[in-house]
Amino acid sequence: MSEQTAVVEQQKTVHLIFTRQDGPDSKPYKEEFHVPYRKNMNIISAMMEIQRNPVNSKGETVAPIQWESNCLEEVCGACSMVINGKPRQACTALVDKLQQPIRIGPMNTFPVVRDLVVNRGRMFDALKKVKAWIPVDGTHDLGPAPRQSAIEQQWRYELSKCMTCGVCLEACPNVNDNSAFIGPFAVGQVTLFNAHPTGALNKEERTDALISDGGLQQCGNSQNCVQACPKGIPLTTAIATMNREATKHMFKKWLSF
């Protein structure tokens, strides 16, 4: 980089407009900031600049922006927020690829704790509802699991990449205050654990949970989830798979009466 280019970049600023909220019961408001531009900076680094020098565009010293982050490489899912109208991870949102002013707000699907920090408890409640885990009875050696083909292993690997980030719920029009829909991610997790040789032992129990209130029947098949998912998880394929399995499960129960 030439000295002249470096000077030009130092003079450039990034214009950010945040939707802030001081607490769960407070009203949201907008606040603007200008931070020094650096090449290849992401939204997290821009917010860290504000944290170091929390002065808004009016020259007022304010409370620093509050957000969650951990891995900074799109693995933990903690830094989910709405950036220029799109739910995504802030760590991979590059300033150079975003139109300014960059508008940043919390995900509306979840209760706001403060600023960009939200309570994603509904996601973990959904995982508990569908029993998205593999129960192990005791600590004794269970022996080798049944062999699985490379295709089955790859299918399970794709489903296992879920970060519980909440982006699919934010993008889904069927997840709202008037709906109990547990969300696409939970369907994907049921598909994952039902495909596991040991997890399949509780397959019917998970499928029962998936066809109860808030389950598959409330999916409108908008397919927003698969487009928004930062990990590219085949959620619509998982939903189609579980719709088929749920139909077979209900017929089996009906014939057993």
Image: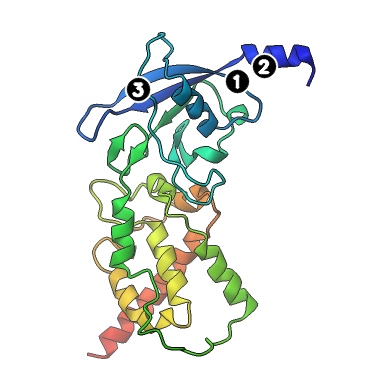
Would you call the spot at circle 2 few (<14 residues within 10 Å), some (14-19), or many (20 or more)?
Answer: some
Q: Which mark is residue 200?
A: none
Is residue 1 left or right of 46 when viewed as pictured?
Answer: right
Q: Which mark is residue 9?
A: 2
* Image spot of residue 2 (x, y percent): 80, 17
Labels 2 and 3: the sequence-earlier one: 2
Residue type, mark 1 in image = Tyr
* Image spot of residue 73 (x, y percent): 57, 46
Residue at the disc numbered 1: 37
Distance, label 1 to label 2, CA atoms, is: 6 Å
Color theme of the render: rainbow
- For the residues bearing labels 1 and 2, Cβ distance under 8 angstroms: yes
Labels 1 and 2: the sequence-earlier one: 2
Q: Which mark is residue 63?
A: 3
Q: Name the residue rendered at 40%, 36% in the picture.
A: 67
- For the residues bearing labels 1 and 3, Cβ distance under 8 angstroms: no
In this rendering, which labeled residue sits more in front, label 2 or label 3?
3
Labels 1 and 3: the sequence-earlier one: 1
